[in-house]
Image (cartoon, rainbow, N blue to C red):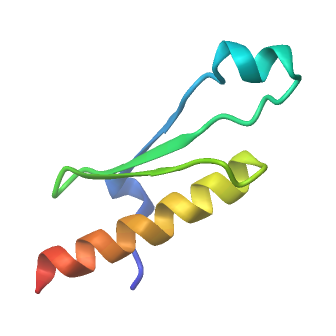
């Protein structure tokens, strides 16, 4: 399933205080599919790119379930 990137809002969260103190600056990523309002969050993957990929996979799965 392919999604139109123009229909997706990307929000990056600031790392929590504990992560900053440990020099772990990987922020979670939230994707919102604007036409449906469905949201997915990716976190804990070691990089923002991987967090975004995880969120995109989750978003596609959620949209697919919604379409059934």
Q: Residue furthest right?
A: 23
Q: Nearer the viewer, residue 17 or 56?
A: 17
The image quadrant of residue 18 is top right
Query: Residue at left 25%, top 72%?
Result: 63
Q: Nearer the viewer, residue 27 or 6?
A: 27
Across and down, in percent, residue 58 comes to: 42, 67
Q: Is residue 64 left or right of residue 55?
A: left
Residue 38 vs 26, above or below: the answer is below
The image quadrant of residue 14 is top right
Q: Is residue 9 left or right of residue 12?
A: left
Q: Nearer the viewer, residue 63 or 46?
A: 46
Residue 47 vs 58, above or below: the answer is above
Query: Residue at left 44%, top 60%?
Result: 5
> What is the quadrant of the N terminus in the image?
bottom left
Across and down, in percent, residue 21 comes to: 83, 14
Callout count:
0
Query: Residue at left 11%, top 86%?
Result: 68
Q: Is residue 43 left or right of residue 49?
A: left
């Amino acid at each position: 399933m392919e999604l139109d990137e123009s229909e997706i809002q990307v929000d990056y969260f600031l790392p929590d205080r504990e992560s900053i103190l440990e020099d772990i600056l990987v922020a979670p990523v939230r994707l919102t599919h604007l036409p449906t309002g469905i949201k997915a969050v990716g976190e804990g993957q070691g990089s923002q790119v991987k967090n975004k990929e995880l969120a995109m996979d989750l978003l596609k799965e959620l949209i697919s379930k919604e379409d059934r």
